[in-house]
Image (tube, rainbow, N blue to C red):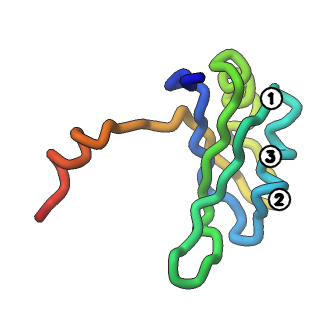
Amino acid sequence: MAKGLGSVLFVSRLSFYTTNQELKRWFLPFGVVTEARLVKDQRTQRPKGFGFVTFESEVQAQKALKAMNGRIVGGRLIFVEVAETTRPEEHAKTARP
């Protein structure tokens, strides 16, 4: 089943000590979270302070965005927005050799 483009949220300014489980728990009150994933440094495996939360529907994602954007979570002011997606061929056009 394909996810709607608006069902994935980008969450930034997270604490470097945030876990995937915490991220999911913070967004569960707004709907069914199908994935909560922190982006980690490839070398150290430590979180980079941002991640993605995927909801079952765009309506649930919009509720979460409105409620969580600009909220203090884990002692930090976080920002939430709809994640931007690019197609592989679009990325190839902008990538430098």
Label 2 and label 1: CA atoms lie apart by 21 Å
Reply above or below: 31 against 85: above
Label 2 and label 3: CA atoms lie apart by 13 Å
Q: Is residue 60 left or right of residue 90?
A: right
At label 3, the amino acid type is Lys
Reply above or below: 80 against 29: below
Task: Out of 69 and 61, give the one closest to the viewer.
Answer: 61
The image position of residue 40, as x and y in percent, is 58, 68
Quarter of the rendering occupied by the N terminus: top right
Task: Out of 71 and 92, give the one closest to the viewer.
Answer: 92
Q: Give residue 21's quadrant in the image.
A: bottom right
Q: Is residue 27 left or right of residue 94?
A: right
**Circle 1 Cα neighbour tier, 10 Å, few/some/many (<14 / 14–19 / ≥20):** some
At 80% from the left edge and 38% from the top edge, which residue is drawn? Answer: 27
First in sequence, mark 3 or 1: give its number: 3
* SS category of the residue bearing label 2: loop
The image position of residue 71, as x and y in percent, is 75, 43
Where residue 74 is drawn, which disc sits there? 2
How many labels were placed on the picture?
3
Q: Which residue is mark 1?
A: 32
Between label 2 and label 3, give the one nearer the viewer: 3
State yes or no: discs 2 and 1 in contact (Cβ < 8 Å). no
* SS category of the residue bearing label 3: helix
At label 1, the amino acid type is Val
Between label 2 and label 1, give the one nearer the viewer: 1
**Circle 2 Cα neighbour tier, 10 Å, few/some/many (<14 / 14–19 / ≥20):** few
* SS category of the residue bearing label 1: loop
Task: Out of 23 and 42, give the one closest to the viewer.
Answer: 42
Where residue 24 is drawn, which disc sits there? 3
At label 2, the amino acid type is Gly
